């Protein structure tokens, strides 16, 4: 009987799908982890805050799937390698890697401590690169999906967000190149740009000296929810879409920026100028 159970467990491991989600302690990352669990995926979730991460783990396990929580700072290469190693140890495969961990910033470049720009690149760009590097051969083996949770700021540079925009432009270029490299391997690469979404990222955004902003300049209650973003992401993975831009404002911004770049310089400047406590007066 025990032997039979072992065979069944082995059989289930061969059939199950596994998703890794970084930045899963809150916001889009947490919503994605729960959404994947609801779809029957076993998950490996990562973030720096292990206590909050364990809350996400408990929500995932309510759906009858396995979930491992790994304390991980994606700006540290060794942490990213450990995340992939722990996932393979638990499940022996990877089907989806969601590079979601990210940080924002809000300050004019002239006033900006360069450590803020470096931190933006280390987390948003290099964190994605590290995780993808250690997972890629396993994703190719499963003909799985790499997701980069990018931003409209990766298509349209935003004033007072030089570090954030730079990291997202870099992310978009990396993902496009990776997608093209793997045209013949079966690897799916999705660039997801949520637009303005209800999340914690603006509350934790860095100011000129690297301290946290503390309050969002936007009315979070009127934005797309993290749960909606998660559902759109999973549908895009199922359809193997290349790029997904969410929210009407995001789609219009990307289109107008292609057609009327100088006009969008003024529009974007004026939009940011209207934010509470904007650096532009």
Image (cartoon, rainbow, N blue to C red):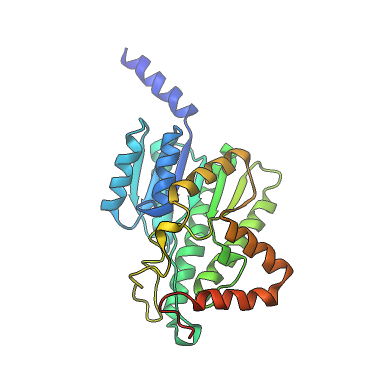
Q: Which residue lies furthest to the right in this view?
A: 259
- Along the viewing direction, whichever of 6 and 22 lies nearer the viewer: 22
Q: Residue at x 46, y 42 (%)?
A: 19
In this rendering, position of residue 59 left or right of residue 103: left
Q: Residue furthest top?
A: 1
Residue 78 occupies which quadrant of the picture? bottom left
Q: Which residue lies furthest to the left in this view?
A: 51
Percent across and percent down for residue 40 are: 44, 32
Decide if residue 22 is in sight here: no
Percent across and percent down for residue 274 are: 49, 76
In this rendering, position of residue 148 left or right of residue 199: right
Percent across and percent down for residue 237 are: 57, 42
Q: Which residue is drawn at 64% across and 45% down?
A: 241
- Along the viewing direction, whichever of 36 and 7 lies nearer the viewer: 36
Number of callouts: 0
- Along the viewing direction, whichever of 66 and 192 lies nearer the viewer: 192
In this rendering, position of residue 256 left or right of residue 138: right
Residue 137 occupies which quadrant of the picture? top right
Query: In which quadrant is the N terminus drawn?
Result: top left
Q: Which residue is drawn at 46% across and 38% down?
A: 18
Percent across and percent down for residue 188 are: 62, 45
Decide if residue 91 is in sight here: yes
Q: Residue at x 63, y 42 (%)?
A: 240
Please tell me whether residue 159 is drawn above or below residue 154 in the rendered image.
Answer: below
- Along the viewing direction, whichever of 40 and 247 lies nearer the viewer: 247
């Amino acid at each position: 009987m025990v032997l039979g159970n072992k065979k069944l467990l082995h059989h289930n491991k061969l059939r199950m799908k596994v998703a890794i989600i970084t930045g899963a302690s809150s916001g889009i990352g947490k919503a994605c982890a729960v959404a994947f669990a609801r779809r029957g995926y076993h998950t490996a979730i990562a973030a720096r805050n292990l206590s909050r991460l364990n809350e996400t783990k408990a929500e995932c396990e309510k759906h009858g799937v396995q979930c491992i929580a790994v304390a991980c700072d994606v700006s540290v290469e060794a942490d990213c390698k450990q995340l992939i190693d722990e996932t393979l140890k638990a499940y022996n495969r990877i089907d989806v890697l969601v590079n979601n961990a990210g940080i924002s910033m809000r300050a004019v470049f002239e006033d900006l401590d360069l450590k803020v720009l470096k931190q933006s690149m280390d987390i948003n760009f290099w964190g994605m690169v590290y995780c993808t590097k250690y997972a890629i051969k396993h994703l190719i083996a499963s003909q799985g999906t790499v997701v980069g949770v990018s931003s409209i700021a990766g298509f349209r540079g935003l004033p007072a967000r030089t570090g954030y925009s730079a990291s997202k432009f870099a992310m978009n270029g990396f993902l496009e190149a990776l997608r093209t490299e793997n045209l013949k391997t079966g690897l799916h690469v999705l660039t997801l740009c949520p637009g303005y979404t209800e999340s914690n990222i603006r509350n934790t955004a860095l100011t000129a000296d690297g301290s946290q902003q503390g309050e969002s300049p936007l009315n979070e209650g009127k934005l797309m929810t993290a749960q909606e973003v998660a559902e759109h992401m999973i549908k895009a993975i199922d359809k193997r879409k290349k790029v997904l831009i969410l929210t009407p404002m995001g789609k219009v911004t990307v289109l107008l920026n292609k057609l009327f770049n100088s006009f969008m310089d003024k529009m974007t400047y004026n939009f940011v100028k209207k934010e509470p406590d904007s650096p532009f007066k």
